[in-house]
Amino acid sequence: MGTAAGPAFDAEALRRGIEGQSAATLLSLYADDAEIRVVDRNTQPSHPMVMHGRDKIGEMLNDVYSRDMTHKMEQCIVQGDHVAFTESCEYPDGVKVYASSMMSLRDGKIVDHTMLQAWDE
């Protein structure tokens, strides 16, 4: 007798959302009660930027992916209920941003996402 597998995470949708700059595609990958923590120069580990729920996450994604810049998913690893990926971005003036993310899944949807990012100054 086999066991039923839960819904799989759609890593290709993640790539399409990132590289196609589609906040709607990316938001569809998150659970309603998801949380994102962002750590960078301005929001350091002891005080990260934290967004709770799809509405707040959607606001952030709409802001980021509406900017005049390119986005590329460099690597993505899905293992069980965990996803790790890296993303490189570039503004038209040549300023580059690099992000590394670790996510936890429930029923194939992102419930917890921690992102570390750095950019040229």
Image (cartoon, grey):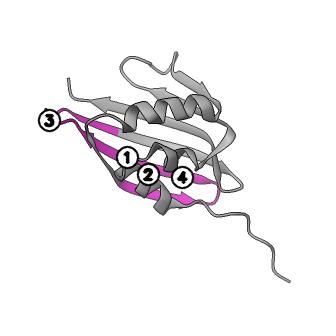
Residue drawn at (58%, 28%) of the image: 56
Query: Local crowd at mark 3 within 10 Å, few (<14), some, or many (≥20)?
Result: few
Q: Nearer the viewer, mark 1 or mark 4?
A: 1
Q: What residue sits right under mark 1 in the picture?
A: 21
- The residue at 41%/57% (across/down) is 16
Residue picked out by circle 3 = 94
Q: Callout 1: helix, strand or loop?
A: loop
Q: Mark 4 or mark 3, which is nearer the start of the sequence?
A: 4
Q: Which residue is mark 4?
A: 83
Q: Counting residues from the N terminus, which is met first, the one under dot 3 or under dot 1?
A: 1
Q: Which mark is residue 17?
A: 2
Mark 4–mark 2 contact, CB under 8 Å? Answer: no
Residue at 38%, 56% in the rendered image? 75
For label 2, the crowd category at 10 Å Cα-Cα, with few meaning under 14, some 14 to 19 and many 20 or more, is: many
CA gap, disc 3 and disc 1:
18 Å
Which x, y percent locates residue 1?
86, 83
